[in-house]
Image (spheres, helix red, strand yellow):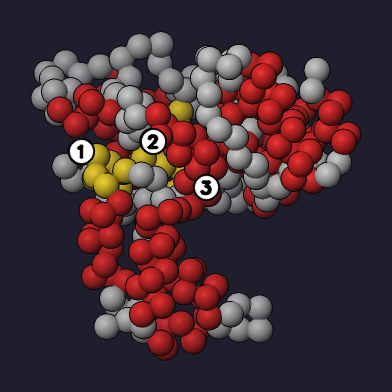
Amino acid sequence: MPPQDVLDEFSRYVQNDIPIRLIYIPEIRPVSRDFVLQHFLPLVQQITEKDIEKWISSNVDRDTAIKKLVSRVVRYAILSHRWLKEGEPGFRDIVNRSIVRERSPSPGFEKLMKACRVANNYGFDFVWSDTCCIDKTSSSELDESIRSMFRWYRNSSMCIVYVAQSSSIADLGRDEWFERGWTLQELLAPRKMKFFGANWKPLTNLSNDKDTNSPVLFAISLTTNISIRDLCYFTPKPSAVDQRMTWAAKRKTTRGEDVAYSLMGMFDVGLQIAYGEGAQRAFCRLIEAIMQANGNTSVLNWAG
């Protein structure tokens, strides 16, 4: 048996720091955190005191070492993409299995299946997609998902990015993926990313397109005006407001309130989700939350 503090951290991590549910790739069905716990438990049980000691150093204490070991075991891929106007599979579609049995699957379901195949090829048993892994009929689940989105992307072992309009790195800057509000945090949060263009062809042969020497990263920096350093080592916090707001300024969201909600993770603040309040009110609440967190009134310059 592993040390008790390893089991405690494993339970805490799965129940708090990964998505509420994931797609279990072998069966193409959504599964709960309890399923994920049982799936990875045999691997966690192999962690020994000797493993922990290998990680402990002058800069890493026991708790941090255990967190690193657990997060390396609990692996899942996460999808970042531009939503189609119609035909994306929803949570109920996957639960009821009706869409899985269709002879002529929708483009959205085909995209999900391609993402599952890619994730599986990289050795993952689980993948998360915002189209079908959130029960949007549950207000509490939707609220938790939106508040936790940055953390879920940050904790993923790989972010699979599908830029459907790009055939090469040269096309990347014109892809709609760079125009959407939610994809900003999906760009900044993951530590490892792999970009796939039209027909799901990888844009590079690198294992990680977020490597500092990646040609994809240079193209992204040029397109977004975000430095290579910020792209690779971004830390969520309520500071550098002017710069970070500029990154988001020209991006669009389908729901007006999402302009504010999509930035919560980037500034490491929390807002209650209240669709229907309107874009202006949501953004003012975001500004207020940032100001309360950093104590700097200069953020009011963005309050409109």
* Left-right relation of 135 to 31: right
Which is more foreground, mark 2 or mark 1?
A: 2
Q: Is residue 207 visible?
A: no
Q: Residue at x 66, y 78 (%)?
A: 59
Q: Is residue 87 visible?
A: yes
CB atoms at circles 3 and 2 under 8 Å apart? no
Residue placed under numbered mark 2 in the picture: 141
In the rendering, at what x and y percent does residue 50 appear? 42, 88
Residue placed under numbered mark 3 in the picture: 151
Quadrant in the picture for residue 90: top left
In the rendering, at what x and y percent does residue 117 appear? 28, 40
Quadrant of the rendering where the C terminus is positioned: top right
Whole-angstrom CA distance, mark 2 to mark 1, is 21 Å
Secondary structure under the numbered disc 2 in the rendered image:
helix
* Left-right relation of 273 to 157: right
Secondary structure under the numbered disc 3 in the rendered image:
helix
Whole-angstrom CA distance, mark 3 to mark 2, is 15 Å
Q: Residue at x 34, y 29 (%)?
A: 138
| Marks 3 and 1, the one that precedes in the sequence | 1
Query: Badge 3 local density, few (<14 within 10 Å), some, or many (20+)?
Result: many
Quadrant of the rendering where the N terminus is positioned: bottom left
Whole-angstrom CA distance, mark 3 to mark 1, is 24 Å
Query: Badge 2 local density, few (<14 within 10 Å), some, or many (20+)?
Result: some
Which is more foreground, mark 3 or mark 2?
A: 2
